[in-house]
Image: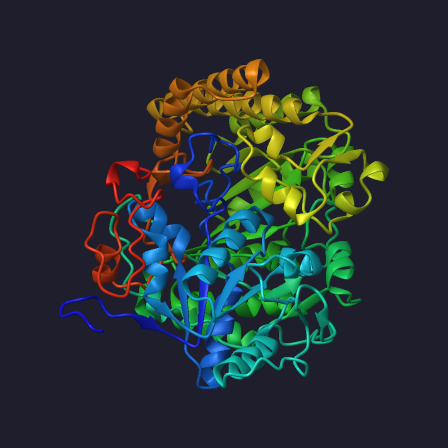
């Protein structure tokens, strides 16, 4: 029955639904979404509302086969519209198949719980999972009642297309489709679809993003390009490293590149809006010079405002000049530590700090606008003293290069050491202890009240609690230094330091309460709720240090129309055919909502 004036339902052949890291984060007053618990290294919250860019390729490939794929960022919608009722929203989304990402492990709780909610609302639909971490945990994930199928692999365009086409015909015969694990893990079709070239062979069309606002200093108009999958490097902590890809994907060739022509077409798809758009060129560190230079030609022709390049080596002078001529170019270096022994043990160590300091002026002279230098906490051989020495070295860089020209940053490795990485698979050899091994152990860890206990690792040199404490100590000291030298305005530096002090005090109070009688008192829960609301009301990162509004980013939701959002807010009248679930307890009381 159609109700006059009711918002239209959305239909598709496949809905790709991105979940928050913790599904019920809005109702949580028993865990802290603490500052630094997501490292503050990218412009997202602790809800991890960014979805994998490979979803664009799935959407495009299925469109080529005449199938409609819609991406709904449930996590972002829940942040932007805190009273939105997710089951009611799901009741308006109709498709034979619903897809979920566990590409990065922080989504292991939310993705499974959101899929379980889909099962309640649409019991006849198929739920499918994909991503690096889903591939690693395929058998365990497939045994979960919320997961019908796990699609393994780094390039799943053809398996997903065949799967959706089969489901659209009303069939459940998937035996001929490769890379599937299903039927509670009893069904396996063989992990055989592993393209060795032309990764994700489809154009990611950015035209939908052309009209996104970019008219305020805090608006973040930023896109990403992904020219390859896998890696030529072997950082021991990374689930996308050479070791991890061999381990998880079962391949010898661990770098599979995208056709360069498709990358060029993607860049052109922003049209005139490119002049107001910046690019984060993820994984350009594995690109050879000829491909990277062609990429730079395309950036210049399209007129992009700026590009940030992550580089694992000190970029050659001819490429530096090419970068500087093509756009406002920024380079991100990540030696991980000032100490060469630690840097090498982490998988880097391709240059010394002395070499880097001699290279920085050459890069700036070649036209590079700025260089960011990342240090990482949680590496082999790294104790508290070493972390603080990295912070002291960061102060030296600020003094020598006047701050923004060579901007040092430091962050902890949180919340997880990547399953499948060398350190996760060979922990004793590298000085690690692993606390969470299974998918379910990681899922439980994601909702632990204290973030140091969410960590799935500690090292021989830093316990989990010590890693938390030295992270606040190091980041706090670096913020002080940036305030002293004018890199950050004093008011911003003071605000961050106040947040750090408040967070540490609150974590200590929670820890004492849990140790005393294993529960959090009501008054403390009220404080936790208020803190979480404030922290999750905006996104931020250590680079800029500003509180940025949630919304308008390339990964925010551009699918669900406003009238449907309005109709599924808690307290809105329940239209005929909806679930009628108005609040987290089913009461319909909007005051029980998160904000």
Q: Nearer the viewer, residue 62 or 436?
A: 436
In the rendered image, residue 568, in percent from the top left (x then y), is placed at 26, 55
Q: List x then y, in percent, for residue 537.
A: 34, 38
Apparent side of residue 199 relative to residue 48 in the rendered image (left or right) = right
When asked about the image quadrant of residue 249, the answer is bottom right
Please name the colour scheme applied to the rendered image: rainbow
Quarter of the image that includes the C terminus? top left
Q: Nearer the viewer, residue 505 or 542?
A: 505
Looking at the rendered structure, the number of numbered marks drawn on it comes to 0
* Viewer-side residue, 534 vs 113: 113
Q: With respect to residue 242, does 31 lie above or below?
A: above
Residue 326 visible in rendering: no
User: Percent x, y for residue 130?
Assistant: 59, 63
Q: Is residue 86 visible?
A: yes
Residue drawn at (63%, 21%) of the image: 388
Where's residue 278, x and y in %?
41, 56
Q: From the viewer's perspective, is residue 316 above or below residue 342? A: below
Identified at 76% across, 68% down, the residue is 253
């Amino acid at each position: 029955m159609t109700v006059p004036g009711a918002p239209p339902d959305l239909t598709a052949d496949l809905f790709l639904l991105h979940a928050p890291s913790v599904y019920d984060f809005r109702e949580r007053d028993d865990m802290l979404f603490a500052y630094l618990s997501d490292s503050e290294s990218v412009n997202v919250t602790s809800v991890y509302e960014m979805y994998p860019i490979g979803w664009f390729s799935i959407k495009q490939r299925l469109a080529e086969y005449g199938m409609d794929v819609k991406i709904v960022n449930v996590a972002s919608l829940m942040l932007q519209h805190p009273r939105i009722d997710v089951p009611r929203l799901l009741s308006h989304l109709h498709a034979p198949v619903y897809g979920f990402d566990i590409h990065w492990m922080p989504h292991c709780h939310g993705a499974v719980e959101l899929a379980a909610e889909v099962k309640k609302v649409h019991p006849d639909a198929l739920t499918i999972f994909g991503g690096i971490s889903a591939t690693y945990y395929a058998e365990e994930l497939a045994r979960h009642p919320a997961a019908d199928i796990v699609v393994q692999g780094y390039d799943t365009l053809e398996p997903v297309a065949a799967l959706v086409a089969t489901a659209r015909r009303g069939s459940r015969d998937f035996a001929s489709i490769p890379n599937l694990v299903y039927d509670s893990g009893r069904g396996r079709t063989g992990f055989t679809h592993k393209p060795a070239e032309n990764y994700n062979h489809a154009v990611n069309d950015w035209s939908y993003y052309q009209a996104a606002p970019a008219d305020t200093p805090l608006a973040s108009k930023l896109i990403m390009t992904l020219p390859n999958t896998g890696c030529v490097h072997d950082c021991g902590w990374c689930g996308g490293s050479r070791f991890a890809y061999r381990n998880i994907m079962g391949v010898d060739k661990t770098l599979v590149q995208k056709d360069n022509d498709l990358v060029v077409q993607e860049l052109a798809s922003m049209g005139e809006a490119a002049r107001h758009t910046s690019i984060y060129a993820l994984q350009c560190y594995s690109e050879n010079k000829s491909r990277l230079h062609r990429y730079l030609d395309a950036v210049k022709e399209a007129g992009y405002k700026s590009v940030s390049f992550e580089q694992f080596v000190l970029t050659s002078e001819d490429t530096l000049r090419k970068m500087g001529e093509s756009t406002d170019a920024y380079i991100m270096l990540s030696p991980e530590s000032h100490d060469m022994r630690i840097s090498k043990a982490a998988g880097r160590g391709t240059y010394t700090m002395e070499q880097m300091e001699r290279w920085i002026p050459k890069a700036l002279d070649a036209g590079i606008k700025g260089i960011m230098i990342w240090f990482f906490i949680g590496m082999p051989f790294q104790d508290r003293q070493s972390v603080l020495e990295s912070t002291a070295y960061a102060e030296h860089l600020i003094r020598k290069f006047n701050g923004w020209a060579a901007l040092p940053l430091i962050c902890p490795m949180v919340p997880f050491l990547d399953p499948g990485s060398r350190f996760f698979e060979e922990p004793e050899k590298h000085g690690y202890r692993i606390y969470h091994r299974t998918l379910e152990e990681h899922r439980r860890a994601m909702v632990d009240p204290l973030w140091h206990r969410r960590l799935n690792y500690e090292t021989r040199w830093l316990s989990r609690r010590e890693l938390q404490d030295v992270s606040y100590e190091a980041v706090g000291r670096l913020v002080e230094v940036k305030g002293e030298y004018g890199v950050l305005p004093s008011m911003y530096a003071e605000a961050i330091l106040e947040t750090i002090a408040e967070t540490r005090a609150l974590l200590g109070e929670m820890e004492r309460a849990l140790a005393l009688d294993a529960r959090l008192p009501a008054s403390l829960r009220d404080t936790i709720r208020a803190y979480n609301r404030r922290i999750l009301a905006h996104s931020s990162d250590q680079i800029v240090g500003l509180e940025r509004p949630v919304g308008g980013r390339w990964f925010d939701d551009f699918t669900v129309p406003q009238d449907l959002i309005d109709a599924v807010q808690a307290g809105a009248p329940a239209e005929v055919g909806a679930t009628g679930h108005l609040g987290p307890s089913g009461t319909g009381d909007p005051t029980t909502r998160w904000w």
